[in-house]
Amino acid sequence: MSGGFTYRDGQLCAEAVPLGEIAAAVGTPAYVYASVSLRCQVRRFFAAFAGQRVLLCYAVKANANLAVIRTLADEGAGADIVSAGELQRALAAGVPPQRIVFSGVGKSRDEMIAALDARIAQFNVESVPELILLSEVAAARKLIAPVALRINPDVAAASHDKISTGRRHDKFGIAYDQAPAVYDLARRLAGIEVVGLHLHIGSQILSLAPFEAAFRRGIELIGQLRGAGIAIRRLDLGGGLGVRYRPEPDLEPELDLNAYAALVRDLTAGQGLELVFEPGRYLVADGGVLLTRVLYVKPGAERPCVVLDAGMNNLLRPALYGAYHAILPVAEPAAGAALAAADVVGPICESTDIFARRRDLPPLAAEDLVVLTSAGAYGAVMASDYNSRPVAAEVLVDGARYAVVKPRIEPAMRFADESLPPWLASPARERGAAG
């Protein structure tokens, strides 16, 4: 658990607020974020890179709540966006445009216009067709698009296959051996200012080796480009810094941020580069939990099945990636309480709606509150109302105070914008009688 979530007087708290108090006020399931954890992660990042020119752009896709973005922005973070919607969120949360970079493999013309008009810091361009379209859009508006080309270094991230992005066959970026020609094209296009090189090889990386391999290739390419007269002044190293979801360090070691910073410092020494980073998960994962209630403990042929009121509609990662989240009771177990294996599942009518199999847990009963930890990233942002279930509230805690920063959305609110066509407007029994 992060410093934002600790047991106090037998109850798990978010900072100074008991989670049971939040459950009583807003219901379950609910996402709860600890401001202190969010702030500390940004401060740790800046401290690791002290003395270097660094632009830290939080990857909004990890958690797009305005209050979360604003908390990070107040500590000096910008925003890494992948859509016009995320641009709107970042601006609404108070992120200065000069701290915003636009990533993503599928930017539309309208999205380019919105970002150009906002005067963002950088477009991370992923293909020649995108580059040409951006040139046309920028030139037509008599604007200049600052561009970093995203280069695919053909380096495996050593993480889950579905969150690796820097291999030759992945959909992201421009092939390394094609980069010089694309840079040469970029510098000749109207409306384009070549400012940098962008690398991002994937997510949840816990080893320095993949970073080093990719970064070395990037530095070598910058040398080639400068030799050809293409002035690269900015190196965008993306994100991908992993967090430890499992409590056992031998199963999932923690990434050493200071060692990562030292690696970057050594590789870029003497290059005169401004550095851009786009972490998402690393800044927010440990700052959030999914607070949920036990509905039933169902006896099983092999082990009990703990049924929660939260499901894959609230937290998709376990169903999507087989991801691990620690599960803790809100009421602190007695010292030496016996643990027993149980399956932990949600209420959704899908066989994949499983949070854990054979997880060793203290005794649990119906109505008990539990949390799934490290849920601040890719949790609420990937949620849905599948099975027409309520969308969980989101709560931000700051010391002894808290606020609902997104209310629980009931099913009727989710279908309030739906309508029946004229031929279905009357009840079925009336239409049948009329026929």
Image (cartoon, rainbow, N blue to C red):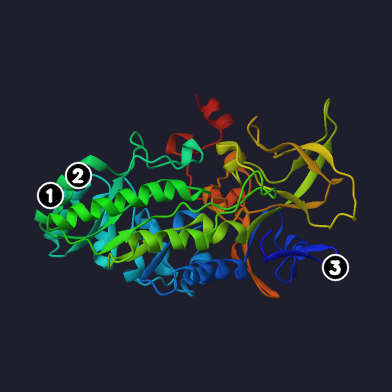
Local packing at callout 3 (Cα closer than 10 Å; few below 14, some 14-19, many 20+) is few
Amino acid on which the number 1 mark rests in the picture: Leu
Q: Position of residue 37 (x, y in %)?
A: 61, 66
Distance of mark 2 from mark 3, alpha carbons?
Answer: 59 Å
The residue drawn where x is 54% and y is 26% is 432
Q: Which mark is residue 250?
A: none
Q: Which residue is mark 2?
A: 128
Amino acid on which the number 2 mark rests in the picture: Val
**Side of 220 relative to 30 (left or right):** left
Q: Earlier in the sequence, mark 1 or mark 2?
A: 2
Local packing at callout 1 (Cα closer than 10 Å; few below 14, some 14-19, many 20+) is few
Q: Which mark is residue 9?
A: 3
Q: Which residue is mark 1?
A: 185
Q: Secondary structure at mark 1?
A: helix
Q: Earlier in the sequence, mark 2 or mark 3?
A: 3
Is residue 277 among what the camera can see? no
Q: Secondary structure at mark 2?
A: helix
